Image (cartoon, grey):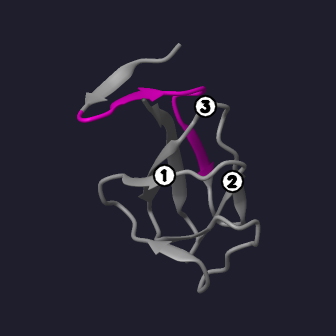
Amino acid sequence: MSSQFIQTQFTVQTVGTIAARAGIDTVATFTPPNLASIAFICVEGQAARLTFDGTNPTATQGLRLPANLAPFRIDLAPNIAIKAIGEAAGGFLTILWARAF
């Protein structure tokens, strides 16, 4: 079940599972559900490195997202998979999938 949670110039609605959460001590892959066009990403515990091109990130390579801040919004390209790893042990990544219309 989806729920509308933000009203701006676009309406944003959750898609699929409310949130996907995984430990990122090793590379974790997140694949958006159908219709998802936005990912709200929250990093907990340790900073994370992300890639969007199918390559595996490392603790020093990839887009760096600091830990314990407000969620980051990333607009998704078609057929994308997000891969993430923590810069150190003990991190978690939570993604809320959504679509704008």
Percent coordinates x, y for residue 94 in the rendering? 51, 47
Q: CA distance from mark 1 to mark 3?
A: 12 Å
- Local SS, label 1: strand
- Which amino acid, by three-letter code, is at mark 2? Ile
Residue at 41 percent across and 18 percent down: it is 3
Judging by the rendered image, the residue that carries numbered circle 1 is 75
- Which amino acid, by three-letter code, is at mark 1? Asp
Q: Nearer the viewer, residue 29 or 9?
A: 9
Residue at 71 percent across and 66 percent down: it is 26
Percent coordinates x, y for residue 101 in the rendering? 42, 29
Asked if the stretch drawn in magenta spans residue 80, the answer is: no
Q: Earlier in the sequence, mark 1 or mark 2?
A: 1
Residue found at the far top of this picture: 1
Percent coordinates x, y for residue 18 in the rendering? 52, 28
- Local SS, label 3: loop
- Which amino acid, by three-letter code, is at mark 3? Leu
Q: Are marks 2 and 3 in contact (CB under 8 Å)?
A: no
Q: Specify whether 2 is left or right of 5.
A: right
Work out whether 52 lies above or below 80: below
Percent coordinates x, y for residue 86 in the rendering? 58, 70
Residue at 23 percent across and 34 percent down: it is 8
For label 3, the crowd category at 10 Å Cα-Cα, with few meaning under 14, some 14 to 19 and many 20 or more, is some
Kindly identify which numbered label has been placed on residue 8: none
Q: CA distance from mark 2 to mark 3?
A: 12 Å
For label 2, the crowd category at 10 Å Cα-Cα, with few meaning under 14, some 14 to 19 and many 20 or more, is some
For label 1, the crowd category at 10 Å Cα-Cα, with few meaning under 14, some 14 to 19 and many 20 or more, is few
Q: Earlier in the sequence, mark 2 or mark 3?
A: 3
Residue at 44 percent across and 58 percent down: it is 44
Judging by the rendered image, the residue that carries numbered circle 3 is 35
Q: Nearer the viewer, residue 82 or 75?
A: 75
Kindly identify which numbered label has been placed on residue 80: 2
Q: Where does the magenta region start and end?
A: 8-22
